[in-house]
Amino acid sequence: MAGNALTRYLASTKNIVGSVLGLGAAAVTVPTHLAGDWWPAAVVGLYAVGAAVAPGARGRGGLATGTQATQALIVDLRTDLQRLVDQTDRSANRLPEEGYLAFHRVVAVLRDILQRAEQLATSPDDLHVVQRTVRDYLPTSLQAYLNLPASYAREADGGEGRTPAEELTHQMQVLEQRLGSVQSAIYAGDAQTLTDQGRFLEEKFHHDGPTGGRGISLGD
């Protein structure tokens, strides 16, 4: 444990910056005798200053690491979703038409949501819903239906006054509605971002425009 910690510190930005400053101090003070017999103190002092001001690993990488993990999860979810679509398409002749079409509507919403990794990274609750839908809710509903004999699935009363075929369609519609809420929240966030940008531009160019004696600069 201590060895791993030492290895991480030696490779850290704090150690690198401190070492550069310390070596620089040695290069200046030793040949010139600028610090006299106190040159070791100057080297250590500058090393300490460099290590203190350099960003630590958490400050530099904590947020990025979390975002990268979310992006990796989303890539995996896209792969899992496509695998589920391929499996379901191979069994399309065993599924009720309305349920099959509803399944593909759910898939279309999921694909749209999964294209928005940045928004999902800031909404863990929505990401959880998407993840469970792809890896649990959808495959469980589909497999439960496919496990039934075809004649029973289309005709028997599966409970709640619905046949299994109708129940599958109902479950796809419930998922479509829930994911539609996630999709709407993402769109609302995008709309708010656009509104905020509009306010920023109004304030900036109303203040900096021709009446303010300053033109628009692409560099601002």
Image (cartoon, grey):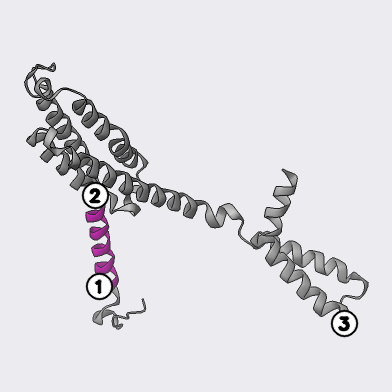
| SS class, disc 1 | helix
State which tag comes first along the sequence, 2 or 3.
3
Image spot of residue 119 (x, y percent): 32, 51
* Vertical arrangement, residue 47 with respect to residue 36, above or below: above
Image spot of residue 28 (x, y percent): 81, 79
Looking at the image, which residue is at 66% across and 59% down? 12
What's the amino acid at mark 2?
Arg
State which tag comes first along the sequence, 1 or 2.
2
User: What is the residue that sits farthest to the right in this orientation?
Assistant: 37
Name the residue tied to disc 1.
206
**34 inside magenta stretch:** no
User: Can residue 122 be seen from the camera position used here?
Assistant: no
Looking at the image, which residue is at 41% across and 50% down? 72
Q: Residues within 10 Å of mark 2 (few under 14, many from 20)?
A: some
What's the amino acid at mark 1?
His
Name the residue tied to disc 2.
111
Name the residue tied to disc 3.
31
**Nearest to the observer: residue 191 or residue 121:** 121
Part of the protein shown in magenta: 190-204
Alpha-carbon distance for marks 3 and 1? 59 Å
Quarter occupied by the C terminus? bottom left
Residue 53 falls left or right of residue 64: right
Residue 218 falls left or right of residue 69: left
The image quadrant that residue 89 belongs to is top left
Image spot of residue 39 (x, y percent): 87, 71
**193 inside magenta stretch:** yes
| SS class, disc 3 | helix
Alpha-carbon distance for marks 2 and 3? 66 Å
User: Can residue 62 be seen from the camera position used here?
Assistant: yes
